[in-house]
Image (cartoon, rainbow, N blue to C red):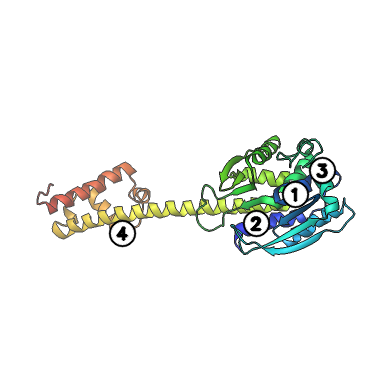
Amino acid sequence: MSENTSFRNTVIDEIIASPIEKGDGVFAFISAIAKNAGVVNISKKRINLVMSVDTYGVAMYLVEALKSVYPTEFEISCDEIKSGAKKGERAYSVAVQTGFTKQVLMDACLINDDTPGIELDVPEKFAREYSYAIAYLRGLFLASGGIYVPSLEGEEKKDGYHFEYRLEDEETAKSVSNLLASLGISTKINERGNMWLVYIKDKEEIVKILGIMNLGDCVLALRRIIDERETANALNRAVICETANLDKIYVAATKHLLAIGIIEDSVGLDTLPPALQDTARCRMEFQQASYEQMADILGVSKSCLNHRLRKLVEIAESIQNGTNED
């Protein structure tokens, strides 16, 4: 299982390990799942609501939520998904009995006697009350949520962190985005295929939304990943920088040593002025030393050292060109 997939499961597991919502909070929770993972089948005068979720654990949690407010049994069935991105995976369906479907939809504020069709917006009753809004967002994650975090291997990409709700229509997406905005969460909306995404890429905003959803363990887990990655990335950058510096030192030292070798083989180092002799011998003895280290050894400034080394290279070039200058 990938780290991305496992973190989504971590979020789901913490949600379904929580106590069932109380009062109208349970209706807000059911509303989000029914709207975004449910299908209403209508046959003559009979209507039937079926909600499909990813795992048996989520299905059982949904059944517990339903049974906390409706005195009946709810059937769970398992089917293989035949098409789409999840083809071949299993889906668990929770069916609401015909006699309770209309009541569930009305309690979830998805239908009313005055307006035909299913409500697309987040129901106002749940949006304006903080605790109900949180219950709605938790249910919405079980129905259509996703969260992805980067692994600790390799450099972090700009889009390494991602939180999303996958929704079926633009109106619902805008309504969910507005709900999150009212809670201080900044989101973006994008159409992808036949779905609309309400998403967050800023890791601190993702930490914030997990906190708002009362997922304390997930907040700690994500914060640990962020801290470990930032530490790893800082170390990687330091190693890369150090390696680049060493490469520069190696290239410079090689150039200096070649020049010194040309001088020694042709006219001898003893023909050089004392300051250049000292510099040449220092370079030969401390081949991996940086400019700062060599300057300290010779007791001169870096600019003075640079001047001497350049002079050695110039002398070697003049020897090669047959224009040696004293």
Q: Looking at the image, can residue 81 be seen?
A: yes
In this view, the mark in front (3 or 4): 3
Secondary structure at badge 3 equals helix
In the picture shown, does residue 323 fall above or below 185?
below
In this view, the mark in front (1 or 4): 1
Name which residue type carries label 4. Answer: Glu
Q: Looking at the image, can residue 273 be seen?
A: no
Residue wearing tag 2:
7
Image coords of residue 27 (percent x, y): 81, 46
The answer for how far apart the CA atoms under marks 2 and 4 are is: 55 Å
Q: Label for residue 34?
A: 1
The answer for how far apart the CA atoms under marks 2 and 3 are is: 34 Å
In this view, the mark in front (2 or 4): 2
Image coords of residue 59 (percent x, y): 76, 58
Instruction: Tell me if mark 2 has few (under 14), some (14-19) or many (20+) residues whose alpha carbon lies within 10 angstroms of its own.
Output: some
Residue wearing tag 3:
106
Q: Is residue 285 left or right of residue 184?
A: left
Residue at x 75%, y 37% (from the top left corner): 127
Q: Earlier in the sequence, mark 3 or mark 1?
A: 1
Image coords of residue 140 (percent x, y): 71, 48
The answer for how far apart the CA atoms under marks 3 and 4 are is: 87 Å
Q: Farthest front residue?
A: 44
Q: Nearer the viewer, residue 302 or 75?
A: 75
Q: Earlier in the sequence, mark 1 or mark 4?
A: 1
Residue at x 38%, y 51% (from the top left corner): 245
Q: Label for residue 285?
A: 4
The answer for how far apart the CA atoms under marks 1 and 4 are is: 78 Å
Q: Earlier in the sequence, mark 1 or mark 2?
A: 2
On the image, which quarter does residue 306 sit in? Answer: top left
Name which residue type carries label 1. Answer: Ala
Q: Is residue 282 left or right of residue 110?
A: left
